[in-house]
Amino acid sequence: MEFLQWDSRDVARWIESVGFPQYKACFTENFITGRKLIYVNCNNLPKLGISDFKDMQVVCARVRELLGITETLWSRSIADPRRDPVALFLEKKSRTGEHAEALTFQRFLYDFYQ
């Protein structure tokens, strides 16, 4: 999960590499780091300056692909089954601080299933 260490320039290079060089500035000017990518979805892309709907769909799909998340992070009912452990782990890792830095996926899974 190398992307968690990315700064906004790394994210800009990544967005260019997936075919959207026109959005590099959107990510750098909004200081989107690898940790903040976890929260990038179609709800907040217009706030970053991305408003083309087809582009939004592809960017969100590429973010989920990078993160290894298959589910979308919106409109969940409490009746739905448990969320993907990878998505939950990444939400924890998106935070900063000693606990988030030290948390490993193995430790998260241990706590998750206890």
Image (tube, helix red, strand yellow):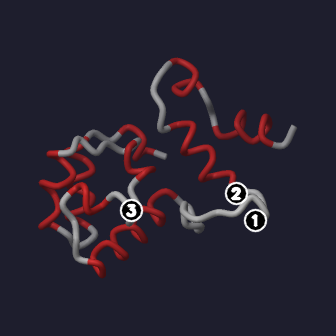
Graded by Cα atoms within 10 Å as few (under 14), some (14 to 19) or many (20 or more), the crowding at tag 2 reads few
Q: Which three-letter amino acid code belongs to the residue tagged 1?
A: Asp
Locate residue 108, reporting x and y percent: 70, 37
Marker disc for residue 83: 2
Locate residue 18, reporting x and y percent: 28, 69
Q: Kindly check if marks 1 and 2 are in contact, taking CB atoms under 8 A apart as contact.
A: yes
Q: Residue at x 17, y 55 (%)?
A: 26
Q: Which three-letter amino acid code belongs to the residue tagged 3?
A: Asn
**Residue 2 versus residue 39: which sits nearer the camera?**
39
Q: Which three-letter amino acid code belongs to the residue tagged 2?
A: Arg
Q: Residue at x 17, y 63 (%)?
A: 23
State the residue lying farthest toward the bottom.
Answer: 54
Q: In this rendering, which labeled residue sits more in front, label 2 or label 3?
A: 3
Q: Rounded to the nearest whole Å, what is the CA distance between mark 2 and mark 3?
A: 19 Å
Q: How many marks?
A: 3
Q: According to the image, label 1 marks what residue?
A: 80
The secondary element bearing badge 3 is classed as loop
Graded by Cα atoms within 10 Å as few (under 14), some (14 to 19) or many (20 or more), the crowding at tag 1 reads few
The secondary element bearing badge 2 is classed as loop
**Residue 3 versus residue 35: which sits nearer the camera?**
35
Q: According to the image, label 3 marks what residue?
A: 43
**Residue 48 versus residue 84: which sits nearer the camera?**
48
Q: Rounded to the nearest whole Å, what is the CA distance between mark 1 and mark 2?
A: 8 Å
Q: Residue at x 58, y 21 (%)?
A: 99
Query: Quarter-wise, where is residue 25 in the image?
Result: bottom left
Horizontally, residue 93 falls left or right of residue 109, namely left
Horizontally, residue 2 falls left or right of residue 108, namely left
